[in-house]
Image (spheres, rainbow, N blue to C red):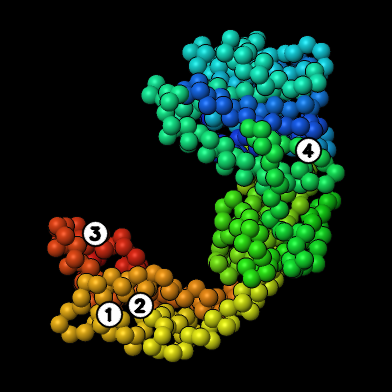
Amino acid sequence: MTYDIAAPDPAGMVASLSSLGYSLPSAIADLVDNSISAEAQNIDVDFAWHGRDSWVAVVDDGRGMNEAELVTAMTVAAKGPATPRAANDLGRFGVGLKSASFSQARQLTVATSTGGDWHVRTWDLDLVEQHGQWRLLHGGDEDTLDVLDKVRPEGGHGTAVVWRRLNGYHVPDVTVDDERTQQQFYAEGSRAEAHLAMVFARFLTGSAGVRLRLSGRPVVPWDPFMSSHLSVLRLPVEELVLGQSSVRVEAFVLPSAQRLTTEEYDRAAGPNGWLDQQGFYVYRRNRLILAGDWLGQRGMRREEKYNLARISVDIPAESDAEWGVDVRKSTVVPPVSLRAPLYRVARQARTKAADVLHHRGQVAARTHGDPLVHVWQVRRPDGRLVCRINRSHPLVQAVLRKGGARTEDVRALVRLLEETVPVATLRVMHETDSADDPEPFGGAEVADGTAVEVAERIYESLVSGGRSPSAARERLRTMSPFDHLQGFWND
């Protein structure tokens, strides 16, 4: 057998690892994974502002590494996905430390000790690209060693990871006195804190006893299921069989706002807000992999009426490949054999969640009867929701009167429409998981007379505003809902 050794170019590999799509919070979470795998009890994440010399460090008091283990840890893909791992190891591909770090900084330094000497190694990506070799440097430069002296864990063992020459900050025009960039830097720290509180919540509570701090502040775990709240509805736990293992699934329906204090409601919304936090929460070895997603289930999309539905899914680590867990540990794809039962659980949770909001909104819906009170009308005349502006409303009549509307009346009507969107009524009248969403102008492909009339008014407005006729038609073609309708703007 003849063959060539086709080793990847270091510069190209660095570029690839740096472009995996890590956010700063998710990159830090990858480092915290390593600390937890090393059985750390105390983990500190530090953000230090020094202008273009700002740095980020993740420090733990875990078992540390000897020199050989450190070199292995710093080697790209030293462990593949098939490598046997300890039960508490949160890694998979053997690139987490490097890919996460390279995505955020040009210099990565790791100092570690098992209780004796401290071993230090550094990746300087500028040198790697300059020499075209994976030159893993012994020790670190003077500034980095100063940082390590400040953050090194007490107790004589543990690991400190330091990022310097941070992407986006290590540029000539960033100075220590740049207050705007400094605020951005610490805002990234706040986002990281919220992300860590969600991803590692199970480790920060119960018997795990991990203490995680960001810039000296304890990270308070965020429970998406409000497990300790008495008004939470828990659906029966299910164990779904997957090969020789099982997947634990438990659905929760959170209380409506009326049963929560303002503080509880705001906290339950989570880092991304109510709409983006609904859906499945997939855990692997108690580490959150995916938060708030309907896993591509057919016909299931994020809608406000399902905000209270959240579902916990625990997958065994040995089924990573079947679930399509990626390098960043941030996406999953359910195995084909589990999609039907997961759909069933999700459908049940969504129905219950919609029922809770339905009960809350019944009174609001019943009040929408007096035509002189409400500017919006919501009906379902033929199985589909229809939203209309109430032409009998006095302010609408004032705007539509012959002779032209007064500017102050138009402004008042626009403001009234903005402030009274009939969200509660829509929640009540919308059938759970049905296809009754309102469609502009009846959903026809060819614009009817009403749609054309509206389009003509917009067209005239664009032309009078200085656009050429062709530019005005082009703008209409990309404007909702005319981008889905056929009319003069397509000619």
Residue density around tag 3, few if under 14, some if 14–19, many if 20 or more, within 10 Å: some
Name the residue tied to disc 3.
474
Q: Identify the element where label 1 is drawn.
A: helix
Q: Nearer the viewer, mark 2 or mark 4?
A: 4
Q: Identify the element where label 4 is drawn.
A: loop
In this rendering, would 194 be left or right of 283?
A: left
Name the residue tied to disc 4.
210
Residue for point 83% across, 38% down: 87
Q: Identify the element where label 2 is drawn.
A: helix
In this rendering, would 410 be left or right of 173?
A: left
Q: CA distance from mark 1 to mark 4?
A: 63 Å
Q: Are marks 1 and 2 in contact (CB under 8 Å)?
A: yes
Q: Where is 17 relative to 404, above or below?
A: above
Sequence-first tag of 1 and 4: 4
Name the residue tied to disc 1.
450
Residue 256 screen position, x and y as percent? 64, 69
Q: CA distance from mark 2 to mark 4?
A: 56 Å
In this rendering, would 179 be left or right of 230?
A: left
Residue 213 screen position, x and y as percent? 69, 35
Q: Nearer the viewer, mark 1 or mark 4?
A: 4
Residue for point 66% across, 19% down: 150
Q: CA distance from mark 4 to mark 3?
A: 57 Å
Identify which amino acid the numbered label 2 is placed on.
Answer: Phe
Identify which amino acid the numbered label 4 is placed on.
Answer: Val
Q: For residue 441, which numbered disc appears in the image?
A: 2
Q: Are marks 3 and 1 in contact (CB under 8 Å)?
A: no
Sequence-first tag of 3 and 2: 2
Q: Identify the element where label 3 is drawn.
A: helix
Sequence-first tag of 4 and 3: 4
